[in-house]
Image: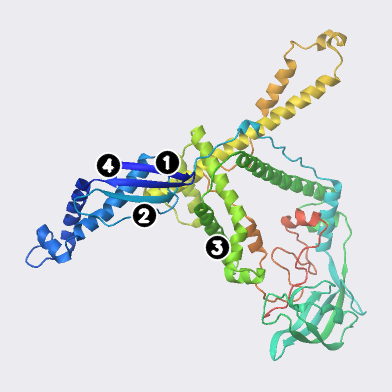
Amino acid sequence: MKKVTVERPSKSEAILTIELGWDELEKASERAYRELAQRYNVPGFRRGHAPRSMLERMLGGESLYEHGLEHLVEDSYREAMRENHLAPLGQPDLETPPMRPNEDYTFTARVPVAAPVELGDLDAVRVERPRVEVSEADIDRVVNDLREQQALWIPVERPATVGDQVIADLKLTVGDRVINDLQDNPFELTDERAGVFHGMDEHLIGMSEGESKEFTTTIPEDYANTELAGQEGHYVVTLKGVKVRELPEIDDELAKASGEFDTLGGLREGIRDELRERRETNADRDFRERVLAAVADQAEVEIHPIMVREEVDAMVRETRNMLEQSHFGLEQFLSASGKTEEAYRQELEPEARARVKRNLVLLAIAEREGLTATDDETQAWLDVLGRVGGKRRRLRDLSRGQREFIAERIRREKATTFVIDAATARTAAEAGAAAAARAGADEPPADELPADELPADESSAAARADMAETMASPDETAAPAAAPETATTETEAAAATADDGGASAPGAPSDGETTPTEGSATIPTEAIVSESTMSGEAPEGTMAAPKGGA
């Protein structure tokens, strides 16, 4: 290359003007001749041995120069990017004018590039870790939830009311279409039922065993299945039985029914330990996220739109893959959410931009602190990935791009650990210093202390602060450097609760919900420590739609 000029219209974009000498084009055309001579058969000559003039006559006079120029432009562009320390984020937009014989050649390349990151003062980051407490009221709520799960349904001879379980033959039709035809189906009556069975319960309240009834309801306009939304549903119902829930006493027998404890006191302590452990984990996660957010907020970096677009693509793939594991499709999810894919992608952009900025900041910290990824760490990362995906890979099997991708993730995790550990140490040190200051304020003057209680020297307070800093433990939730990253997004949460508009049996539990049954004596540990049971809110999906729905 004779000359390279770099312009920066913005921090995230570069325009390279590259001038090539005619001698370079001559050499490129010679390389093109040798390559094409091996590719084409020229009559009268063995492949690869045809004279250049014969090959030019067959392909066209300028063909060798044009083919050589194509490779020369690509090679010189890459060399110019490397020499100017520019990291491309995508393919360049090339302006390549026609070539003129015996003249130098100039072309331009406009390319999105990684902008420099201006880090803030990491030592100034202050994030308070939330305190973890478990109250007796928290434990009471979980115990009461266990009691609800251990409830028995007892037959009664009276009209049904809200909260009762009824057993019924139920047939629902819309026009000539049978939506459900159920026999001896149990479900609980409620005054707040959504979905296709909206409005059904009010017609069943007051019915007694052996009674039959026909009635009509209107399916909600916002029902996910647009073919049924707003239509009239015709019911034919015969009530086979009415049951009332009988709650067990809160005693040792309830504890034993959980399958893990012999006494009520043991059950309560077990609940306390499980809740504390879960809340500690959540507190660590919250501390980690707020520290990383604070570090990213301090930094300044220009983010090119192509990076946001690619991150949105990745988030959409995450959603699609997770939905497929639940036998959903992205199209079903979007339909249930009432969104187009374009609207959904626009909704993801703010989070995508935040993720891109965080990753860029972490890589800048890794660069500043000299955090690298060794071959052993890369192999360990592959081993973890192999245990999850079932296919083991070796380092030597990876392409250069794959190795760089994994190394980048490892460096980001190391940078994450670095900033979390630093923030944890600062928080502990400041807390220790504050405690020491409070303790000093409560002590009487030194001349009033007994001789054996006098401080050894004037640096005691500082020594206590130093000891507090020394004893500060690193954040236990930081991922190991060699472990693959995992990310939980709002996208995943939304996908986990997506509804495809199908219908299941009335009263059927939604995923993760436990329905009490007669004679049930085992309570999953997850039910004991469920945070949702402590919120005082009723679990969603208590009454779902019937089986075999549209």
Query: Where is residue 550 drawn, in percent x and y?
Result: 66, 81
Q: Amino acid at mark 2?
A: Leu
* Res 2 label: 4
Three-letter code, disc 4: Lys
Which residue is labeled 3 in the image? 321
Looking at the rendered structure, the kind of residue marked 1 is Asp
Disc 1, SS: helix
Comparing marks 1 and 3, which lies closer to the viewer?
A: 3
Residue under pointer 1: 375
Dot 2 corresponds to which residue? 94
Identify which residue, 63 or 139, lies in the foreground: 63
Q: CA distance from mark 1 to mark 4?
A: 39 Å
Element type where label 3 sits in the image: helix
Q: Tell me if mark 3 has few (under 14), some (14-19) or many (20+) residues whose alpha carbon lies within 10 angstroms of its own.
A: some
Q: State the colouring used for the structure image.
A: rainbow
Quadrant of the image containing the N terminus: top left
- CA distance for labels 4 and 3: 50 Å
Secondary structure of the residue carrying numbered label 4: loop
Q: Are marks 1 and 4 in contact (CB under 8 Å)?
A: no
